[in-house]
Image (cartoon, grey):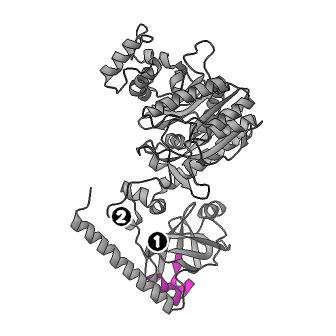
Amino acid sequence: MRLSESSSKSKKTSVSSLIEVRLGKVQELLDLGIAAYSTGFVPDLTSEEFANKFAHVVDADASGDSVRLAGRIMAMRILGKASFLRVSDSTGNFQAYLARDTVGVENYNLLKKMDVGDIIGVEGAPFRTRTGELSVLTLRFTMLTKSLRPLPEKWHGLSDVETRYRQRYLDLIVNSGTRDIVRIRSRIVSYLRNFLEERGFLEVETPMMHVIPGGAAAKPFETFHHALNRQLYLRIAPELYLKRLLVGGFDRIFEINRSFRNEGISTQHNPEFTMLEFYQAYHTYEDLMTLTEEMLSGLAKQIFGGFSFQYGDGDVDFTPPWPRMAVREALIHHGVLNPEQIDDRNSVFIKAVETGLEVGKDDSLGKLWMALFDELVEDKLWGPVFVHSYPVEVSPLARRNDEDPTVTDRFELYICGKEMANAFTELTDPIDQRSRFEEQVQARALGDEEAHFLDEDFLRALEYGMPPAAGEGLGIDRLVMLMTNSQSIREVILFPHMRPEKGS
């Protein structure tokens, strides 16, 4: 529900008054000679380590051990002679028990200067309360950071999606589910890196600013380097630089990279995103199907303990082997075209027009196939399923198939109706590659802003000779969405790009 203008102003006024109250408490602390923003307190345990180490404490007597923990106050229950604080850190939360007789009257009165949101350090002994909760019997506590702004809804939750994405720091404070996504994302990236390194792949870093954008069909972001006096582009993919490394003699390489595409924002797209891109010399796209299947099924087993997990309203099963289907097979299998229509360009064109697609009267059969595939097939591919044999005209960097030169040795991996990976046996023939680039240049001249540029230096590298190889790009953000059951890419990117706030 959107706040009315008057209620919005009232909310802002209320927050401002609370900030004034907390600023007054800062001054009161300073008057007492106590720093509201201090340093030097070093905890020796996290809340998780505290819970594990002292799980054996079973009664109300202090164990005799001494502990130091720190975190943000998430709840306070102030009583006459004793109080309970719920304190959160990066691994969970713990309870601190403060008794007036234990910490001293003067220190106990300092609780009145503290608020939910403050960051404190506590020292004391582990014990269990009468209700059986492991807690810290606090002997000393230290104010580390005074929070001036109140947490939303008294910290019980932050549900406004816009606020969650714009103020991710606040979302992380109050929503444990968001913190869980961050941790799972880290586990996924670590697994992918280790999987490839264990198989002899070398991690590399290539430029993020390109003289010529390439490696994908996308509109780039433009910038300008004044010292060099030249136009530069944020990379849309690292592909052409990674292939230069294949020419240079590295047979197995990968990069976990940030790429940028000057396109729309949606639940599936962010202009800045993360990809894993890897290349393996002397292998084919079919080998990468097998490798990808092994990599992702192993990842599912590590995250979920098995091959099956839930996404949205359905279940996903990563049990190998995964089905493989050519583009033309997919169009027939899902009832878009019948076997008599599939190779008849006129019939396919009529179908595309009847479907309401914007297609050109001169579009090739392959382009018409893909227009229909994207519109009528893609979202039906729950998968995981490898779709292969893409038309040449939509695969300018992929090798032609030996048996059918109108298609390429390329596959895309689909899971839950979304493209998760794109891979192909690389085009190593510099003559064929130049011809493909020239076709892309013509398409750009006719208004296709996503068509490839002609990269002379890359062609020169191919002329020195690139070994036969296969390469793949895997979308990290979409993979994290899948494995955290997130419906929007903004849930899995810490600081997603947003439209400007009103009034900013």
Q: Characterize the local packing of mark 2: few (<14), some (14-19) or many (20 or more) Cα atoms within 10 angstroms.
A: few
Is residue 245 in the magenta section?
no
In this view of the protein, which residue sits in the foreground, 503 or 192?
A: 503
Residue 60 versus residue 240 in the image, above or below: below
In this rendering, would 31 be left or right of 41? left
* Farthest-out residue, front: 229
Could you tell me the amino acid type at mark 2? Answer: Ser
Which label is found at residue 117? 1
Give the image location of residue 357, x and y in percent: 34, 26
User: Between disc 1 and disc 2, whose residue precedes?
Assistant: 1
Residue at the location (41% across, 35% down)? 313
Q: Residues within 10 Å of mark 1 (few under 14, many from 20)?
A: many
Residue located 64% across and 32% down the image: 471
Q: Which residues are magenta?
A: 97-112
| Magenta run includes residue 111 | yes
For residue 363, say whether it is visible: yes
- SS assignment at label 1: loop
Quadrant assignment for the C terminus: bottom left
Furthest-top residue in view?
A: 340
Q: Nearer the viewer, mark 1 or mark 2?
A: 2
The percent position of residue 43, horizontal first and vertical second, equals 64, 71
Q: Residue furthest right?
A: 249
Residue 184 shows up from this direction: no
Q: Residue at x 56, y 84 (%)?
A: 103
Q: CA distance from mark 1 to mark 2?
A: 27 Å
Which residue is denoted by mark 2 in the rendering?
504
Residue 378 lies in what quarter of the image? top left
Direction from residue 402 to residue 37 in the image, left or right? left
Magenta portion: prevailing SS class: helix
Which one is in front, 66 or 228? Answer: 228
Task: Provide residue 370's location: percent of width, then percent of height.
Answer: 45, 24
Q: In the rendered structure, find residue 202 and report the number of the disc placed on it.
A: none
